[in-house]
Amino acid sequence: MDKERRLIIAGNWKMNKTVAEALDLVNGIKREVASVKEVDIVVCPPFTALSEVSKAILNSNLRLGAQNMNENGYGAFTGEIAAGMLKEFSVRYVILGHSERRQCQKETDQLISKKALAAHGASLKPIVCVGETLAERDGGLTEKVLDTQVRGSLAGLSKAQMEETIIAYEPVWAIGTGKTATAAQAQEAHAFIRRLVGKLFDQNIARRARIQYGGSVKPSNARELMGLPDVDGALVGGASLDDRSFGEIVRNSI
Ligand code: PEP
């Protein structure tokens, strides 16, 4: 596949896996993707497994991501994790504003932009998630919702910071449901987001910006989705919990 932008495929393990299970999974993924050089491959275990997974992927082609972080530095924020703490485990990426956090933890675009700025402050690359619900899509509001979320979540980022930011388009109705956006729906949303990044930053940044698709990505649909002109990788939930499925998604995307 000949794309100007390097694909990035990340596995979001969510609230799954003990440390022992996480090690089994990451060792399996390592074997599955050992020969892949063309794609950035990221695993995002729960916080409790970051330390061991970090050691397990030393000298491999896998990189480490976290699933969330707090927008503040150190201090009195019980139960929270700061960007600096993630750095201790060589975390490179952090998922921000996943729809589950937007829904369950009521995260707002404003909060997500604060987190993105804090992530950049610690040289972590944020993966900023946006996406519409089914009601919003059915109501013809997809572009309006994406416009609000992208503007709000990326607010305050410098051009240089945007260059190091990844956007994940994840239609909420496709997450964990087995329903995937059609190729046309995904391409349309990604092209819309890219145009918006062009307006908010500049055309060169938009051309280089990496926009992942997320929502029931599996081995059988990865090739078609990753082949779309404005799709630059995937954020994978369920299928990233199985080393063979995740490996196949990665290999099918090349
Ligand atoms: C996700 O949680 O980011 C996701 C896309 O999940 P799934 O692949 O299971 O739909």
Image (cartoon, rainbow, N blue to C red):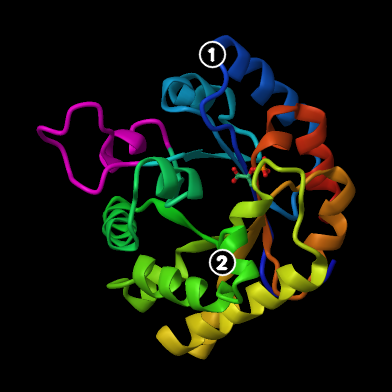
Q: Nearer the viewer, residue 230 or 153?
A: 153
Q: Amino acid at mark 2?
A: Glu
Locate the C terminus by quadrant. bottom right
In the shown orientation, is residue 53 left or right of residue 47? Answer: right
Number of numbered tags placed on the structure image: 2
Q: Is mark 2 within 8 Å of ligand 1?
A: no
Residue drawn at (37%, 69%) of the image: 154
Q: Amino acid at mark 1?
A: Thr
The magenta segment: 69-90
Q: Residues within 10 Å of mark 1 (few under 14, many from 20)?
A: few
Residue drawn at (42%, 74%) of the image: 148
Magenta-colored segment: predominant secondary structure:
loop
Q: Residue 80 is drawn in which quadrant? A: top left
Q: Label 2 belongs to which residue?
A: 136
Q: Residues within 10 Å of mark 2 (few under 14, many from 20)?
A: some
Residue drawn at (65%, 79%) of the image: 191
Residue 168 position within the rendered picture, expressed as x and y whole percent measured from the top left = 56, 59
Q: Label 1 belongs to which residue?
A: 18
